[in-house]
Image (cartoon, grey):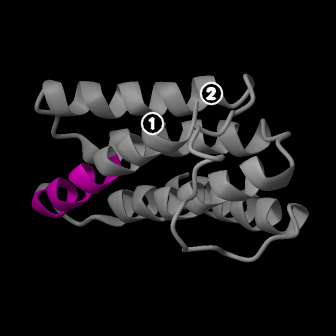
Amino acid sequence: MKNTLKFTLTILAIALMVACDSEKQQSDINLNDGEKWKVNSEMKPHIERGNEMLDDFISENGTDYLQLAENLKAQNSALVKSCTMKGESHDELHKWLHPHLELTDQLSDAKSLDKAKEIIPQLEASFDTYENYFE
């Protein structure tokens, strides 16, 4: 089941990249003339819910990082499916999304809680980056 979900999410991420006609971008995210980029209303709840899940895990000193990873992947999948953005805002969002998806995969692949504890602050920083550049 876990491998099927991982495979499905990987295919969705690849399909999104191809459908969006964009190459994988790892460059810095830019603001929109000094302002945050607008994210469509269909996508926001999935990002916000993922952030809430991570915050809850941290505040409750959670240990089931594999469940957290599964929950985050479900939100990421819903996020990808709800994407209707176009243009520059879409391209800038991808600069955040690709590394974020990779971090979620790393959490899912972590072999220990200690390793997960190295990844969780990176996920937290990823959500902070989203908040700094998107609304």
Res 131 label? 1
How far across and how far down the image is residue 72, in percent? 47, 41
The amino acid at mark 2 is: Lys
The amino acid at mark 1 is: Glu
| Quarter assignment of residue 18 | bottom right
Check the image and name the residue furthest to the front. Answer: 33
| Quarter assignment of residue 26 | bottom right
Res 44 label? 2
Q: Is residue 38 above or below residue 117?
A: above
Comparing labels 2 and 1, the label whose residue is closer to the camera: 1
Q: Is residue 111 above or below residue 68?
A: below
**Mark 2 or mark 1, earlier in chain:** 2
Left or right, 15 with respect to 67, comes to right
How far across and how far down the image is residue 39, in percent? 69, 34
How far across and how far down the image is residue 113, in percent? 14, 55
Crowding at dot 1, Cα within 10 Å, few <14 / some 14-19 / many 20+, comes out as: few
- Write the start and end of the magenta stretch as one range: 114-123
How far across and how far down the image is residue 106, in percent? 37, 65
Crowding at dot 2, Cα within 10 Å, few <14 / some 14-19 / many 20+, comes out as: some
Between residues 13 and 47, which one lies in front from this camera angle?
47
Q: Is residue 100 above or below residue 55?
A: below
Left or right, 34 with respect to 110, comes to right
Instruction: Label 1: state its secondary structure.
Output: helix
Residue at point 60%, 23% (across, down)? 45
Query: In terms of secondary structure, what is the magenta stretch mainly?
Result: helix
Residue at point 18%, 33% (across, down)? 58
Q: Is residue 37 magenta?
A: no
Between residues 23 and 8, which one lies in front from this camera angle?
23
